Amino acid sequence: MLRLAIQVRRADAELVLAELIELAPSGVEEVDIDAHTVEYAVYGPPGELPELPELKAAAGGALVKVTTTEIADDWADRWREFHKPLVLGDRLSVRPPWEAAQATALDLIIDPARAFGTGAHATTRLCLELLLDLEPPPVALDRRPTVASRPAAVDLGCGSGVLAIAAAKLGWQPVLALDYDPLSVEATLDNAVVNEVTLEVQRFDLREQPVPAAPLVLGNLLAPLLLAWCEQLADGIAELPALVIASGLLATEADTVSAAFAAVALLETKRAIRGEWAALLLSRES
C-alpha cells in the first residue's frame, strides 16, 4: 500500500483540494504541516493512485512538495488509533463509533469515514465551544414565517457533519449542511442517521453560489473562502445572518477576517484561540 502526498500553500489549499477530489474520489486525507502549508494524501495500490503528473497539475503553482511512502498493509485498522473522543466538560462529546459513550449531556457519534475526522481538530473544537455558549437558541431570532423552508442554522463546509449535528441537537432546527465534496455530503447524511437528527444536506460551491439565509451560520472554512462570503454580503448577493461562528482561521488571520465582517455590519463579540488557530463569534450590528 502506498501513501501519495502533496504539500501545497495554505492560501490555495481549498482550490487544490477541489481538483484533487476529482482525481481521487475515494477520499483525500488533510494534514496541517505548519502555518503556511497543508498536505493532502491519497492511499492505495500503485495502479489505483493518481499519476504524479496529474497531482502536480492539480496543485499548480501552489505545489510545495510531493512524497510517496510505502505503508503497512494493516494501515486501515491502525488509523483508528488516531481518532479519540473530544470531550468538552460535561456538556458535549464527539467520538468515533468504536469508542465508548461519554458521560456528557450530548454524546455525538461521528464516523470519520474517508478521513473527514471526528471533530478533534482545533478549528472544529473552537466552533463547538462557541456554539455551546449560544444555547439555548433564541426562539424568534430573525425567523420569517413567510419563508417556510428557511433554516435556523447553516453549516458551511460540513465535512463529516459534526457542527450541523451538534447544532440540531442543541435546538437549531432545521439545519442546512453544505459542502463542495460529494463524499462530505454522503458522510454527513450517514452521521445524521446515526445521531437520530434530521438535516438537509446539499453539495454547494461558495465561489459560485450565494450562501443561503439563516439566523446562524457556522463557517469552519479557510480565510479566503470566508472573505469570499464577505464579498457576497457586501454586494448584496447573500443575506446578512444574525450570528456567525467563523473558524478555520490562523490566529494571524483573525484581525483581517474580523475587519472584513465588520465592514458588512457583522461585529466580533468573542474570539477563541487554540494554538495557532482562531474562531470568531460575530453578531449583526443593531
Image (spheres, rainbow, N blue to C red):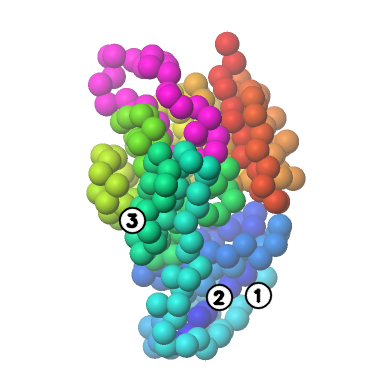
Name the residue located 62 percent from the left edge and 39 percent from the top edge: 279
Vertical order, 154 against 14 (above or below): above
Classify residue 123 as left or right of residue 217: right
Mark 3 — residue? 187
Name the residue located 62 percent from the left edge and 70 percent from the top edge: 7
Query: Of label 1 and label 2, which has the lower sequence position?
Result: 2
**What label does residue 149 carry, if any?**
none
Residue 9 percent across, percent down from the top left: 66, 61
Q: SS at mark 2? A: strand
**What label does residue 65 carry, if any?**
1
Query: Of label 3 and label 2, which has the lower sequence position?
Result: 2
Badge 2 amino acid: Ala
Image quadrant containing the C terminus: top right
Q: SS at mark 3? A: helix
Name the residue located 49 percent from the left edge and 21 percent from the top edge: 242
Residue 13 percent across, percent down from the top left: 58, 58
Badge 3 amino acid: Ala
Badge 1 amino acid: Lys
Q: Quadrant of residue 186?
A: bottom left
Mark 1–mark 3 distance (CA, rounded to whole Å): 29 Å
Query: Of label 1 and label 3, which has the lower sequence position?
Result: 1
Looking at the image, do the residues carrying marks 1 and 2 touch, with CB atoms under 8 Å apart? no
**What label does residue 5 carry, if any?**
2
What is the magenta range? 127-156
Mark 3–mark 2 distance (CA, rounded to whole Å): 23 Å
